[in-house]
Amino acid sequence: MEVRDNNQIDYCFILPNELRQLLIKPYGFLFTNEDLLIRYIKGVNSRIISVGDVVTVTLFKHGIKPFIAFVDGKTKRVIKISSDSYSITLLNEPGLIRLSAMSKIKELLSSNSHNVVFVEGEEDLLVIPVILYSNNGDIIVYGQPNAGIVMIRNNALIKEYVEDLFKRFKVKKC
């Protein structure tokens, strides 16, 4: 799916209420045991992309530096990620995905540099453009509230599923 940012006008892709229940379900494998997830991730030779404060801190705690990490500084638990480690800041309000955020994510995933991205607003829905723009074989991990950590090995099938969901978002100028 190609989304273009013409004339620097920002558009917002709004999550419709009827999709909320679908997005509550994990896209990939749900790990309720942190040690199993870490053992799996340490055994792969793929880029790791994390979305969420808790999952990002968990990876850092185990010596795993994600290729890109998206955090918003908000969680049910007290989590501190040093502001020194943020290399980029994105604006993305709850319940939507900004076109400007998508464009930046696409750019970051095409680069060769590691980044910790601070999201002003909420990072949860950014899993969608991460899946759409990351490479097949990349490992994407994100937190599943009150359940555990979801791990996806990106592939064409999951991209197709997520693209179908994303096409159902409502679009408006921000």
Image (cartoon, grey):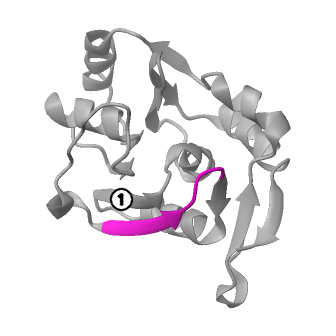
Q: Name the amino acid, label 1.
A: Val
Q: Pick whichever, 155 or 18, lies toward us.
A: 18
Looking at the image, residue 3 sits to the left or right of residue 111; the answer is right
Position in image of residue 41 (x %, y %)? 31, 24
Figure quadrant of the N terminus: bottom right
Looking at the image, residue 97 sits to the left or right of residue 19; the answer is left
Residue drawn 70% across the image and 90% down it: 7
Residue holding disc 1: 117
Looking at the image, residue 42 sits to the left or right of residue 173; the answer is left
**Residue 25 occupies quadrant:** top right
Q: Secondary structure at mark 1?
A: strand
**Residue 99 occupies quadrant:** bottom right
Figure quadrant of the C terminus: bottom right
Residue drawn 47% across the image and 18% down it: 146
- Magenta stretch bounds: 88-95
**Residue 111 occupies quadrant:** bottom left
Q: Label the magenta part by its dominant secondary structure.
A: strand
Q: Taking 51 as reference, is 106 above or below it?
A: below
Question: Is residue 78 visible in this depiction of the protein?
Answer: yes
Position in image of residue 136 (x %, y %)? 55, 40
Q: Pick whichever, 26 or 39, lies toward us.
A: 26
Position in image of residue 96 (x %, y %)? 66, 55
Looking at the image, residue 12 sits to the left or right of residue 18; the answer is left
